Image (cartoon, coloured by chain):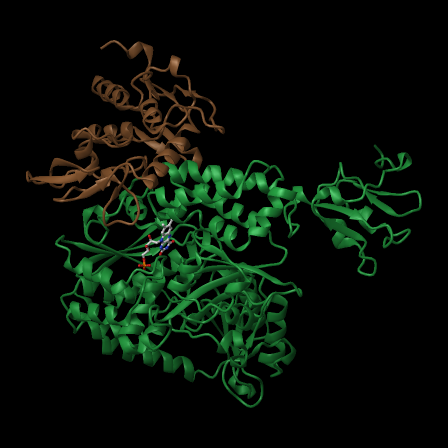
Amino acid sequence: MSENRITIFVDGKALKAREGEPLLKACLAGGIFIPNLCYMEGIDPLPVSCRLCFVAVEGRAQPVPSCSIPVREGLVVHTDTPEVRRLQRQGLRLLLSTHHVECARCPANRHCALQDMTRFLKVGLKPKTVYLKAPPVRSEHPFLDYHVNRCVLCGRCVEICKARQDRPELTFIKRGFDTTLGFFPGGASNPQDLKTYRACVEACPVGALVLKDSNKNP
Amino acid sequence: MYEALKKEALKRKRAFEEDPRPIIQIGMATCGIAAGALETRAAFQQVLAERQIPARIRTVGCMGHCYAEPVVIIDHGASGFPPILYPEVNSGKAAMLAKLFLENGDPRLEHILGATKENDMIPSVMEFPRFNREKRLVMEKCGHIDPEDIYDYIAGGGYAAFAKTLERPGDTLIDEIQQSGLRGRGGAGFPTGLKWELARQSQGKEKIVICNADEGDPGAYMDRMLLESNPHQVLEGMLICAHAVGAGRGIVYVRAEYPLAVKTLEKALHQAKEARLLGNGILGTSFDFHIDIFEGSGAFVCGEETALIHSIEGYRGMPRQRPPYPTESGLFGKPTVINNVKTLATVPAILEHGAQWFRGIGTKNSPGTAIFSIVGDVTHPGLVEIPMGVTLRTLIFDICGGIPNKKGFKAVQIGGPSGGCLSEAFLDTPIDFDTLAEAGAMMGSGGMVVMNEDTCMVDVARYFLDFTQKESCGKCTFCRIGTHHLLAALEQLTEGKGESVDVNFLQRLSEDIRAGSLCGLGKTAPNPVLTSLKYFANDYQAHMKEKRCPAMACRPLVAFYIDLEKCARGCDVCEGCCPVDAVFTTPNRKKGIDQSLCVKCGECMTACPPEYKAVMKVSPPHLAPVIERPPQAARKGK
Ligand SMILES: Cc1cc2nc3c(=O)[nH]c(=O)nc-3n(C[C@H](O)[C@H](O)[C@H](O)COP(=O)(O)O)c2cc1C
């Protein structure tokens, strides 16, 4: 990424940005909200997996995920077209259809990415059809409890482990709708790891990962 | 150096041909073996040994005629007959042919398919459309050469194209491929020359060529057949590509479910190394190229190029956003060309005969041939290679013999789970990359399933969605959850619980999954739904509004009953074959079906003698007239 400051146009507003940085980042920094879950600075390649940060870029027929677009001078972007919103709402509804809404009991309550986005996109928190998995909580990890039906599988925790551990212990397992977070058994015994897992919990946008009670105090 | 190899190959060929003993040639690819070719070979071996018949057995790959497996060609020159192709040679037939033909010179003409050479005694197989309408360019040598003998390939001109290209600079090869208009046979039809050019221009070092033999489409097996029948042609394609783009390393990514292909490849690699066609200083030049095999572990998504790369790198097979494309940053970040088996196998022929020759075959925008594995309701299923631009009608009806059992054509599903279902209206459409894409289907890797009038398109869409949903890697929201919703709706329809499902819901969700998904799997997963909605709207309407399955294929939506007018008094066949004792006898000694017990297996309908045809099938199920089970006919012994 270069240090070149360039100008892009988002929803008619001129924004300064650094050439080559992700469009999503530039927009968020410029005060234009775009729904997103999986984006985290410093991951390469970015997952581009939550499929929420769609925008319309002039010159492209279809909405594109803004985290995957490096900005360049003069880029013209619209974040609020009907096509963009339709995809974002559909994506959010799909995520909510696998989400157990129990906000009052959830540690992410009031700073939850899903709550924010439902408000922003005007989508009801409780869709008609919900598919939940059993058991709802998995506790086999030494430091973490995993709330399966809160998880949106954004993969932030997986990325953090990958970046910090020689042999990352968090990964996705299974396929299709059954895909879920899994742990390689065995490790996770040194205090360094606890730090990593605390970072994972902090990065979780929805309160799906919770430190076990015994590990809560620093 | 190549000349020496060629000379040796021709010497061996001559020795083989000059040997007067008859030759028994058996197709021993996976398909042949599944049909019993191992037993066939054992039977030949046994009879030859017992009766001291001086004949030679030669094993070859597959000719693509699945309906005729195990296929045997007997070349018994001394008998005065031309080489003869025998279909469906089981061990009994093998023993009989060994005795009667090889020993006594009687070719048992009632068992033959035809002669494999023109002659005036027996009709040639080339008189059948299944043979003469094909255009074999990639599969030309398949089933005719011994895949385990590199010299057999070289004797027929193998590796000559590569040897010639070694003398040419790489960029001229890329020009040639670009001019030929070759498009990738692995799915999207991306121009191969352009892909190679991008890799060649790429700044990165240590470039890599990967042959994609993951072939995960259900019902597709042309890549397996090529690797098992003529692996050297694929290796030659890889060598040419490596020389063109400047790669030093190659990998064949082949699924572990293809053990015979892996074994054949290993042998081929070994022989190519021995012949100095692989390794350091190839054919005495300064060109080095090494090929390894990587066995994939059975995930459909690993055929997607970025997932394939992750899988080789040791990670979970999950795709990533492109760009960067693999030609820029591929395996371990190095510039990587990924091509399908068929694409690579086409390359030697292009360099041998030239781009103009290749352009003369097929259509303007899709030159060359297409290989389809045609399965389902056709008389002669198997692998067919045709020039692009042939119509579906020619392919299905002329070449593959049409629909068996006097049934009507309903649909053809092209391109596997990413493809679409086309209706009769498309039978006269010439097949190439663009016409298929326009129709909403896809060339895909070339799987083709033909379906007759008894097929329910809602159920077919459900089947493919079930596959893609299970094979989704789970990374992105639309593919992971969207296909689950779509599948659930289709399941409701096929189970008669689809009151709340409507066409708009299916259409919108499908479009969103297509627009929202990360990789090709999700982007194309809704195709079977979108095309069947478009071309078979009536099937959906009937399931939604009337709970009726027009093809009477969805079990919960049909019922069987017995037409008392037709039922013959005293006949007990249906009652005897019912696995759940749902059939009972009425007071006037006719039959009835207890709907509460019936599992709708249809056994009674099959069993009812043709002179009565008294068992009826209806949809929706409430149309079946109610016949009360008399109390005295309560379930036997219960
Ligand atoms: C879900 C999915 C599965 C795929 N499976 C295969 C496959 O089995 N074999 C293959 O050659 N290409 C497959 N592809 C296409 C590859 O990504 C890639 O485009 C192809 O190997 C390029 O080769 P070509 O240019 O020779 O066609 C698949 C793509 C997707 C999205």
From this view, report whether residue A143 is shown above or below residue A86: above
Considering every residue shown, the one lying at the far bottom of the view is B120
**Residue B85 drawn at (x, y percent):** 54, 76
Which residue: 86% across, 35% down? B634
The answer to whether residue B285 is left or right of residue B412 is left
Count of marks overlaid on the render: 0
Q: Nearer the viewer, residue B330 or B21?
A: B330
Q: Nearer the viewer, residue B250 or B339?
A: B339
Which residue: 93% across, 46% down? B588
In the rendered image, which quarter is residue B53 located in?
A: bottom right
The answer to whether residue B24 is left or right of residue B543 is left
Q: Nearer the viewer, residue B411 or B275?
A: B411
Residue B610 visible to the viewer = yes
Residue B273 visible to the viewer = no
- Rendered-image quadrant of the C terminus of chain B: top right
From this view, report whether residue A75 is shown above or below residue B367: above
- Rendered-image quadrant of the N terminus of chain B: bottom left
In the rendered image, which quarter is residue A51 located in?
A: top left
In the rendered image, which quarter is residue B471 located in?
A: top left
Write down the colour of chain B: green
From this view, report whether residue B635 is shown above or below residue B144: above
From this view, report whether residue A194 is shown above or below residue B479: above
Split into quadrants, the picture shows ligand 1 in the one at bottom left
**Residue B468 drawn at (x, y percent):** 45, 45
Considering every residue shown, the one lying at the far front of the view is A12
**Residue B387 drawn at (x, y percent):** 41, 72
**Residue B253 drawn at (x, y percent):** 33, 53
Which residue: 67% across, 66% down? B406
Q: Nearer the viewer, residue A156 or A125?
A: A125
Write down the colour of chain A: brown
The answer to whether residue B397 is left or right of residue B251 is right
